[in-house]
Amino acid sequence: MSADANCLPGMMPHAEQYLARVETVRELARDTWAVQIRQPELAQRITPGQFFMIRPESGSDPLLGRPFALYDIYSDDNGQPTGIEFGYVVVGKLTSIMSNWQPGTRVILWGPLGNGFPVPTSKRLLCIAGGIGQTPFLAVAREALGLQTYGLPARTITRKPENVTLCYGVRSADYAAGLDDFNQPGLLVQVATDDGTAGHHGLVTDLLTEQLNAENTEVQVYCCGPEPMMKAVGDICLAANVPCWLSLETPMACGFGACFSCVTKVKISEGEWDYRRTCVEGPVFRAEQIILP
Ligand SMILES: Cc1cc2nc3c(=O)[nH]c(=O)nc-3n(C[C@H](O)[C@H](O)[C@H](O)COP(=O)(O)OP(=O)(O)OC[C@H]3O[C@@H](n4cnc5c(N)ncnc54)[C@H](O)[C@@H]3O)c2cc1C
Ligand code: FES
């Protein structure tokens, strides 16, 4: 079903609804799983930082789908995209149900949704992730490093960053998800843990500050994680005059612009603000645009 056909003004154009099947399920870390879903059309169209909504085909509890970011796409032997993979941590109703999904489970997906991260244009790209906020950065990094293209037509990188770094903060080593996946040629990964069980003992913002102290020209920062962490990252970047994009994980009901359950406060001019829907005008916003509590 196409959301284009009856799309109201301001709603997400080009999103489609698909019936699809789970292909593989694998454990990424404590309470954290990755699921591959065969859906070639969505895999061809989705870009890094975009998301989709998902729910089981059967049952009515939960009634509403839940949003998940693209982790990566996967392809057949001819390099044709055949499916999408996403990573999730178990927090509530649907994610608990999802932890019982098996290959063959039938699901309803709709997407691609949201704006996603822009194509990077600077010499250095710093991705700052907190907890499950690491999920968009596998595709971001692979695209930036020229290892995979995304979108239809494929997005082009006019200036490949000379280095791409992921600074990844988690509670403890057992929650560090997908480190093998992030082992990509050219990608530097730095881990911070609250309890010191891996990498830097402290906050991921310490790693960001270190990186910016080393060099803060020609750098772009992309960030996703818990709001207090994103606020801190945005503040550090604004103070350093470094362009920064934040990907919000606001709870959502419809995902395509109809219900206004996902609004966030944005600055529209000096001293004035308004609400914007995270699902269509986001989830990625410039740090100076949004007002986080
Ligand atoms: C654009 C976007 C991309 C996302 N990508 C991912 C991803 O890649 N991986 C991932 O694990 N999660 C992601 N999330 C968050 C994910 O959508 C929620 O974890 C999921 O909806 C929880 O569903 P549930 O039915 O298990 O929890 P529920 O039963 O609905 O809720 C359980 C608890 O979690 C809280 N909660 C639910 N959603 C959120 C949220 N978005 N932020 C903070 N608290 C919440 C509820 O208030 C409640 O306390 C993303 C969210 C957005 C908006
Ligand atoms: S989730 Fe419905 S408008 Fe954004």
Image (spheres, grey):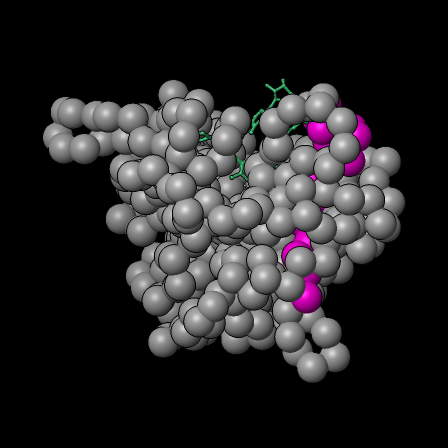
Q: What stretch is highlighted in magenta?
A: 82-98
Q: Position of residue 22 (x, y in %)?
A: 78, 50
Q: Which residue is drawn at 82% across and 36% down?
A: 99
Residue pushed farthest bottom? 78
Residue 117 in the figure: left or right of residue 166: left
Residue 17 visible in the shown view: yes
Compare residues 216 and 221 and report the one nearer the observer: 221
Q: Is 95 covered by the magenta stretch?
A: yes
Indicate which quadrant contains ligand 1. Answer: top right
Q: Quadrant of the C terminus?
A: top left
Q: Position of residue 271 (x, y in %)?
A: 14, 25
Residue 215 visible in the shown view: no
Residue 236 in the figure: left or right of residue 143: left
Residue pushed farthest left? 270
**Above-or-below relation of 9 to 274:** below
Q: Which residue is drawn at 52% across and 62% down?
A: 45
**Above-or-below relation of 121 to 174:** below
Compare residues 150 and 40 and report the one nearer the observer: 40
Which quarter of the figure has residue 138?
A: bottom right
Q: Which residue is drawn at 49% across and 49% down?
A: 2
Residue 154 in the figure: left or right of residue 75: left
Residue 65 in the figure: left or right of residue 163: right
Q: Where is residue 146 in the image (x, y as percent from the top left)?
A: 52, 75
Q: Residue at x 32, y 31 (%)?
A: 276
Q: Report the number of numbered marks.
A: 0
**Above-or-below relation of 33 to 211:** above
Q: Is 145 covered by the magenta stretch?
A: no
Q: Position of residue 1 (x, y in %)?
A: 55, 47
